Amino acid sequence: MLEDDVLERVSHRLAGHVSLETRDRQALRNLPRELEEYGAGACVTSAGATCDRTAILLEGLAFGQIGSPHKLRQIASFVLPGDLVDLHGALTGVSAQTIMAVTDCKFATFAVGALGRLVDDCPRIARALLMETLREAAVAREWVMNVGRRTARQRVAHLCCELAWRSREAGLGDGESFQMPLSTDQFADATGLTRLHVSQIFQRFEDDGLVVRDGPTMSILHAAKLGAEADFDDLYLRVGANR
Amino acid sequence: MLEDDVLERVSHRLAGHVSLETRDRQALRNLPRELEEYGAGACVTSAGATCDRTAILLEGLAFGQIGSPHKLRQIASFVLPGDLVDLHGALTGVSAQTIMAVTDCKFATFAVGALGRLVDDCPRIARALLMETLREAAVAREWVMNVGRRTARQRVAHLCCELAWRSREAGLGDGESFQMPLSTDQFADATGLTRLHVSQIFQRFEDDGLVVRDGPTMSILHAAKLGAEADFDDLYLRVGANR
DNA sequence: CGCGGTATTGACGTTCTTCAACACTAGTGG
DNA sequence: CCACTAGTGTTGAAGAACGTCAATACCGCG
């Protein structure tokens, strides 16, 4: 029902944290999975809703938001291809974030029960998921720092650095130029600013020859300078042992 | 070497997420542990340092900060009695946060290797640690929301609500009045504000009969009103199944 | 007593937001 | 082909929220 590619994607991701044995790969192979697609702007999961399926993103871009939609929105995480979606919901039964698709998205989905059994039966997979969650927490803490203590310009710069880094990790683009079809509003909601201010900041980035945004594609022209200004240190993203 | 109380504390905490069997409790009982004490203001672990021991806080109060000390500080988490300290460091080998003791602290510490074996051998304990980490991530995301999209007054109010809730959960005070010996500076670093602004906000809280801070003890006089104003919903704190 | 850490006050700046208006694009349906 | 809309990005001016600076008060401690 679904390309075998998926299995590769999951095991590659998990193997980034822990070395899986054939028994683990076998268990992953046997995990029943389905393909689900969501259109751009669709809501994939709702915070507070009970959760019966979990997913891994195959193609597209999504984000997780906190707070009631259309009221006071804060984007708290981005989901890139290869990332797990709503592991919180899968293991606790109720989703913690509202996940929204930025572009059209393809997910491979799994029943939470099957995932739970996997965790109980395969210690190495459990551990890999634990590492994955530790990284999520580390990213969230870095975002607290970003939004809490950095200037507007630094926040946007830092977010650009993270997105570039993760895009490269996900195998999209070369890390200099990549697809990042976020609206100014979405950048604003991720950095705790207004779209107006973000717009001005990107203009200056362009003037300064740091970042160019041309429609959906974003280019980091001077990564070292941008990273230095943003106080960006990729340590928090490199959680696995095998990296 | 250490009161048996510790075992109870750990198992109680983990059992909040998953029902442990006698085999799991036995494994916890056999885990070699030591008591370590740190004075107020001491640095328990440093971000970026290799980590060979992990801990659970028995008594006292600590916090985790991001960013270089004395430069641009952001507090990203608080550690209350019963909380695990630096699980990230324990499982990845390098600490992600700098943990500082607010008051004198007593920790029960474990070698990371022993903890790793526990994760590999006891699926239920692994799962409980996974839940614990999921909660940490959920709290961090809520903090992103707090610092990114709420007014200064709401941020402080929200933090007060969280600390009150967790103090009660940890069995300290009745949730209305409890020990919270944080300096104005520390409140500021946790909310992304300046100590000056925080000071003014607490004054108004007192005027409005919401919160009173008298030295190390904090009293929530009107929890409902405070929670409503802060947009506080304790869902993100209630992660375990057995709560 | 003097000293360092912490809290507070008031005056002053700046960053960032809010508001209202306008340009651009892509769909619509006539 | 042309309105008509809706979504998005940009502009300028006014204003609020919050930060910075300098000075003072408080308190425990040697």
Image: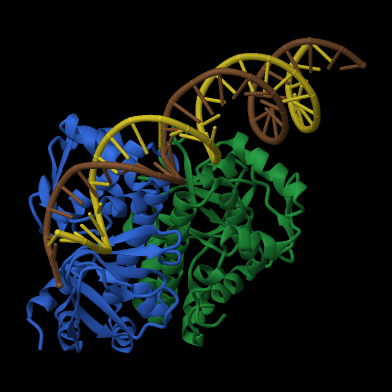
Chain colours: A green, B blue, C yellow, D brown
Q: Is residue B12 left or right of residue D24?
A: left
- Residue at the image position 53 percent from the left and 79 percent from the top: A15
Measured along the vertical axis of the image, is residue A53 above or below residue B103? above
Quarter that holds the C terminus of chain A: bottom right
Question: Could you tell me which residue is drawn at 36 percent across and 71 percent down?
Answer: A117
Q: Against B56, is B71 above or below?
A: above
Q: Residue at x 74, y 62 (%)?
A: A176
One can see residue A163 in this view: yes
Which percent across, then down, holds residue B83?
23, 67
Residue in front for this viewpoint, B43 or A157? B43
Position of B42 compared to A171: left or right?
left
Quadrant position of the N terminus of chain A in the picture:
bottom right
Q: Position of residue B5 (x, y in %)?
A: 8, 76
In front here: A10 or D27?
D27
Q: Report if residue A94 is visible in the image.
A: no
Q: Relative to residue B9, is residue B30 depicted above or below?
A: below
**Near-viewer residue (B130 or D16):** D16
Residue at image coords 64%, 66%:
A170
